[in-house]
Amino acid sequence: MNLTEIQHNLMGDWDGANLLQFPNLADNLSTSHLSIKPIVKRKFLIFTYTWSHEGSSQEGFILLGYNKEQGIATAAWADSWHMSAMILPCQGAIDQHGVITLNGSYKAPTGRYRDWRLTIRTDSARELHITIRNLAPEGAEELAIRANYRRAS
């Protein structure tokens, strides 16, 4: 499956809830709005979203592309809470069910590199789920974000 085949199920406006889970922080559940649109002659999708943390509004985007010949999905991710002024480049794939999996690395405060795994999936044209996991160097996965959306009316 490729981006062209699944973009119909992704495009549009979505409303839902964003759960932020991080070690040493209380879980943070907030409302979230997501908008997905094609750009650059429909070769890319731009995901723009809002959420909040402790009463402070946050926003972010994911710019997603797919090279059909190589079977490689690429993305740029930025978020007002998770990153300072950096863009996290990601690379991954779209599986036969249309699940998009992207991986990226960042330098943690300890100086060691850590990995993110971002997964985007639709159960139907009415539901969309985004999960982001922090991958520890020893292999453990920690849920960082779970966002569940329903198509906006």
Image: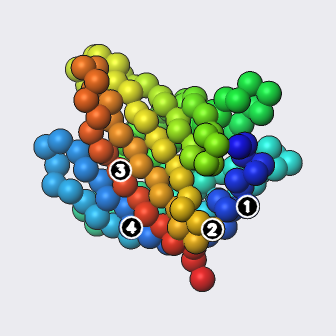
Q: Amino acid at mark 4?
A: Ala
Give the residue number, with chain letter if any, for mark 1: 8
Q: Nearer the viewer, residue 118 or 85?
A: 118
Q: Amino acid at mark 3?
A: Ile
Query: Marks 2 and 4, how far apart in space?
Result: 18 Å
- Point out residue 58 in the picture as x, y percentages from the top left corner: 41, 57
Give the residue number, with chain letter if any, for mark 4: 17
Query: Marks 4 and 1, how far apart in space?
Result: 22 Å
The mark lying in front, picked from 2 and 4, is: 2
- Point out residue 70 in the picture as x, y percentages from the top left corner: 74, 25
Quick one: label 4 or label 3, which is nearer the N terminus? 4
Which quadrant, please, contains the N terminus? top right
Mark 2 falls on what kind of element?
A: loop
Quick one: label 2 or label 4, which is nearer the N terminus? 4
Give the residue number, with chain letter if any, for mark 2: 125
Picture residue at 35% right of the left edge, 50% below the top: 145
Q: Are marks 1 and 3 in contact (CB under 8 Å)?
A: no
Q: Nearer the viewer, residue 35 or 101?
A: 101
Category of crowding for the residue at label 2, using alpha-carbon neighbours closer than 10 angstroms: few (below 14), some (14–19), many (at least 20): few
Quick one: label 3 or label 2, which is nearer the N terminus? 2
Query: Marks 1 and 3, how far apart in space?
Result: 24 Å
Category of crowding for the residue at label 3, using alpha-carbon neighbours closer than 10 angstroms: few (below 14), some (14–19), many (at least 20): many
User: Which numbered marker is on residue 111?
Assistant: none
Quick one: label 1 or label 3, which is nearer the N terminus? 1
Q: Are marks 1 and 2 in contact (CB under 8 Å)?
A: yes
Quick one: label 1 or label 2, which is nearer the N terminus? 1
Could you say which quadrant of the image residue 20 lies in? Answer: bottom left
